[in-house]
Image: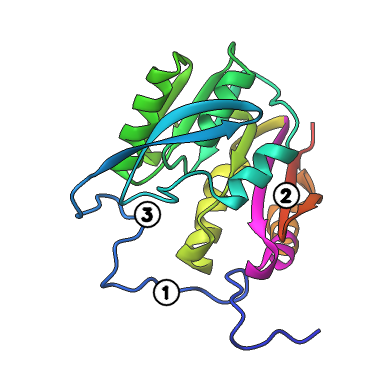
Amino acid sequence: MTRRPDTPDPAASPATPNPGTEHYFSEDPSVPEVRRPVTVALRGREVVLQTSNGVFSPRGLDKGTSVLLRNVPDPAGEELLDVGCGWGPIALSLAEAAPGARVTAVDVNERSLALTRDNSAALGLGNVEVLLPEQVPAERRFDTIWSNPPIRIGKPQLHELLLRWLPRLGPGGSAWLVVQKNLGADSLQKWLATELGEAFRVSRHATDKGFRVLRVERRA
């Protein structure tokens, strides 16, 4: 089927942010922070957390993250990673599902990092370590990665981000990524399989409400 020219597909063509607009992936949002409480269900548990302007999905749990959390199995292993943590729903879900594991939550947005730290503390989750990407120790490897990656940053940046973190899966580790179908999920799946090579297996785990949940496994 031929893609309509007005249909975005970041895995095939980059989306360029509007330089006059503040985006959730900004490292230091310039708009004054206004926090607000939101009630969300994280894998069946209803909690009250803090969000803010200047971060991704400030009004509550976005559809993609909801799909991811609904479709992934419990995390395996002792080293877990949330790439692009935002205000923390994925990292907090990992931490609650695996209280004996360490959850590394990374983001480039300082406001997001502060929210994830505060939300982790509010839920009494002491196993979440919130870091900028460059602060993650180079030798750290991960057993499970969950991510709603920032597709709209554009193809080159998205590919760079995925190739930064997915190769850090340990042997037998798995990454679970949620990507909207009409934003290039299928072409991204093919690209990942080609780029990561024989050491990895890339598959479609689930389709839910217009989203794909992709699984990336590192062979043992």
Mark 2 and mark 3 residues within 8 Å of each other at the beta carbon: no
- Residue ID for mark 1: 16
- Among the 4 quarters of the image, the one containing residue 165: top right
Disc 2 on helix, strand or loop? Answer: strand
The magenta-colored residue range is 172-189
> Disc 2 and disc 3: Cα gap in Å?
22 Å
Mark 3 crowdedness (10 Å alpha carbons): few <14, some 14-19, many ≥20: many
Is 88 in the magenta?
no
**Residue 82 position within the rendered picture, expressed as x and y whole percent measured from the top left:** 53, 36
Mark 3 and mark 1 residues within 8 Å of each other at the beta carbon: no
- Residue drawn at x 56%, y 77% as measured from the top left: 13
109 relative position to 181: left or right: left
**Tag nearer the camera, 3 or 1:** 3
- Residue ID for mark 2: 213
- Residue ID for mark 3: 24
Is 186 in the magenta?
yes
**Residue 62 position within the rendered picture, expressed as x and y whole percent measured from the top left:** 54, 49
Residue type at mark 1 is Thr
Residue type at mark 2 is Val
Mark 1 crowdedness (10 Å alpha carbons): few <14, some 14-19, many ≥20: few
